[in-house]
Amino acid sequence: MRHREQPKQKTVLVWTPEIWDELRACFDSTDWNVFVNSTADVSELADTVCAYIKFCIDCVVPCKTIKLYPNNKPWVTKDIKHAINKKKLAFKDKNANMIKEAQKELKYTIRKGKKEDWQKIQKKLAESDIKGVWDGINLMSGLKKSKNTINHNITIDYANELNDFYARFDCHNFRGKREQMKNELNERIVAESERLYIREYQVLCTLKKLNSSKSAGPDYISPNILKCCADSLYKILCTIFNMSLFQCKIPPLW
């Protein structure tokens, strides 16, 4: 006896042009100097700013719960689902004419959905988007991705334990020399008049070039949000980058 796989529920963010404008307005009305003046540590500043960005997203962007059916095809659109529901109502009313029209409409929408989905794959192939082509083929073939088993709750102590484990075969300890070189570099940086400095326009251009389809990093902020809100976030991010260079320190959140 076969058991039917139950649909899975997933919570997603609902993005509309109005929501994007509201989120940008929330960032534009923020006095970022309050965060900068509250601490001199780049790690604390990065944690605070990232937490505030996620707080604004939670307050502004609404969420909805959707169902993911195991037999859903990539070409199944809203029009096809509407045609299926229309056919069900026709069967329920036992109207032969309505059933015939609903069946005709359903065949047309399915044919249209398959054609549009295939055209998308052909367009990606013409644009040399190999990743998009393979994603489409995997969806068509029903290939499921392996589950991600990475543990995101990794502490600094656990990372140091892994470093000690994989570096146990080193016969020389260069920790003292590394500290000496680090101190010499810090003194040289402080003594030099011209310091390495990141410009605001460089950060803005980099944010606008981000790939929106990439997954979020350790800070759990989507590249799509950084790209669409680049005009509102580039100044505070530039401040964090320059503070990181000045203190010769990378925030653990990164």
Image (cartoon, rainbow, N blue to C red):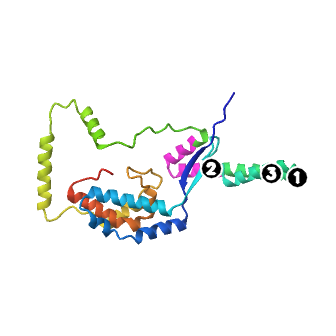
Name the amino acid type tagged 1. Answer: Asn
Mark 1 vs mark 3, foreground winner is 3
Mark 2 or mark 3, which has the lower sequence index?
A: 3
Name the amino acid type tagged 2. Answer: Asp
Q: Are marks 2 and 1 in contact (CB under 8 Å)?
A: no
Residue plotted at (88% across, 52% down): 97
Relative to 143, does residue 93 appear above or below in the rendering?
below
Q: Which residue is mark 2?
A: 117
Q: Label 2's element?
A: helix
Q: Are marks 2 and 3 in contact (CB under 8 Å)?
A: no
* Image location (x, y in percent) of residue 126: 54, 51
* Image location (x, y in percent) of residue 121: 58, 48
Q: Which residue is mark 1?
A: 97
What secondary structure predominates along the stretch shown in magenta? helix
Cα separation between marks 2 and 3: 27 Å
Bounds of the magenta span?
116-138
Q: Label 3's element?
A: helix
Mark 2 vs mark 1, foreground winner is 1
**With 182 as the anchor, is 156 left or right in this view?**
right
* Residue most extreme to the bottom: 29
Name the amino acid type tagged 3. Answer: Leu
Residue plotted at (88% across, 49% down): 96
Q: Which mark is residue 89?
A: 3
Mark 2 or mark 1, which has the lower sequence index?
A: 1
Residue plotted at (61% across, 42% down): 140
Q: Which mark is residue 5?
A: none
Mark 1 or mark 3, which has the lower sequence index?
A: 3
Cα separation between marks 2 and 1: 30 Å
